[in-house]
Amino acid sequence: RKEVEQDPGPFNVPEGATVAFNCTYSNSASQSFFWYRQDCRKEPKLLMSVYSSGNEDGRFTAQLNRASQYISLLIRDSKLSDSATYLCVVNIRRGQNFVFGPGTRLSVLP
Amino acid sequence: DAGITQSPRHKVTETGTPVTLRCHQTENHRYMYWYRQDPGHGLRLIHYSYGVKDTDKGEVSDGYSVSRSKTEDFLLTLESATSSQTSVYFCAIGRGLETDTQYFGPGTRLTVL
């Protein structure tokens, strides 16, 4: 089993739709969690950290369920500019052992 | 802008030649990382550094070496490049109180013929 797994995608949704991405991780000792977005042929950019209490940043909401070892990202009111690949990242040991999921590609269609 | 640059941005080389990629940061962060990204594999850690002259191996370190003689520079060397090392290479820094948030450079696209 891979350490970090994500929905295989791609997701093709119309503008204005709500879309949810799921991520599971295998190491119960994982300490911190993140979502990154990566545009085609660009570097990954931090979208948001994920906290146990859940957190929201505008149209984006992230949830963490440690018991189920599951992370989610919800995007509301999708924009064309949200089209990208979304990477789930898990950190097992501070400063080290960052494990990236394979990514889920999102295309928002006009 | 995380103040990270990578050079060169693109390189084509031949099998068996040595290649060095440079990562430069302007913010004096202690942790720096080298990743490679390939289709179907996502980002995989090659080596990382937690200070000047302090480095350690990552998941895919075979065939790569690193050096960090100054805080701001982290070099990745392919001693004898192979076609399997054709990839996009990203450097990252670790930020935050517990260095648990990474910011990436723009990447180097390396082709080994």
Image (cartoon, coloured by chain):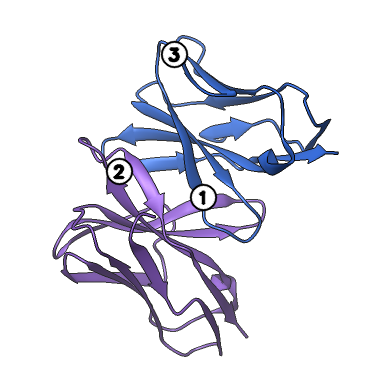
Chain colours: A blue, B purple
Residue sitting at x 44%, y 13%:
A66
Neighbor class of circle 3 (other Cα within 10 Å; few <14, some 14-19, many 20+) is some
Q: Percent position (x, y) of residue B37?
A: 55, 58
Q: Residues within 10 Å of mark 1 (few under 14, many from 20)?
A: many
Q: Quadrant of residue A24?
A: top right
Q: Which callout, 1 or 2, points at the residue further toward the start of the chain?
A: 1
Q: Label 1, on which residue?
A: A44
| Residue B82 spot, x, y in % from top left | 54, 79
The reply to whether dot 1 and dot 2 touch (C-beta < 8 Å) is no
Q: Is residue A1 visible?
A: no
Q: Which residue is mark 3?
A: A66
Q: Which subunit holds the residue at mark 1?
A: A
Q: CA distance from mark 1 to mark 2?
A: 18 Å
Q: Is disc 1 placed on a helix, strand or loop?
A: loop
Packing grade of label 2 (10 A; few <14, some 14-19, many >=20) is: many
Mark 3 is on which residue type?
Answer: Arg
Chain for numbered disc 3: A
Q: CA distance from mark 3 to mark 2?
A: 20 Å
Image depth: mark 3 or mark 1 in front: 1
The quadrant in which the N terminus of chain A is found is top right
Look at the image and tell me in which quarter the C terminus of chain A lies: top right
Amino acid type, label 2: Gln
**Quadrant in which residue B54 is drawn:** bottom left
* Residue at left offset 72%, top offset 30%: A78
Label ID, residue A96: 2
Is label 3 on the same chain as label 2?
yes
Check the image and report above or below for B53 versus B16: above
Q: How far apart are the alpha carbons under marks 3 and 1?
A: 25 Å
Q: Amino acid at mark 1?
A: Pro
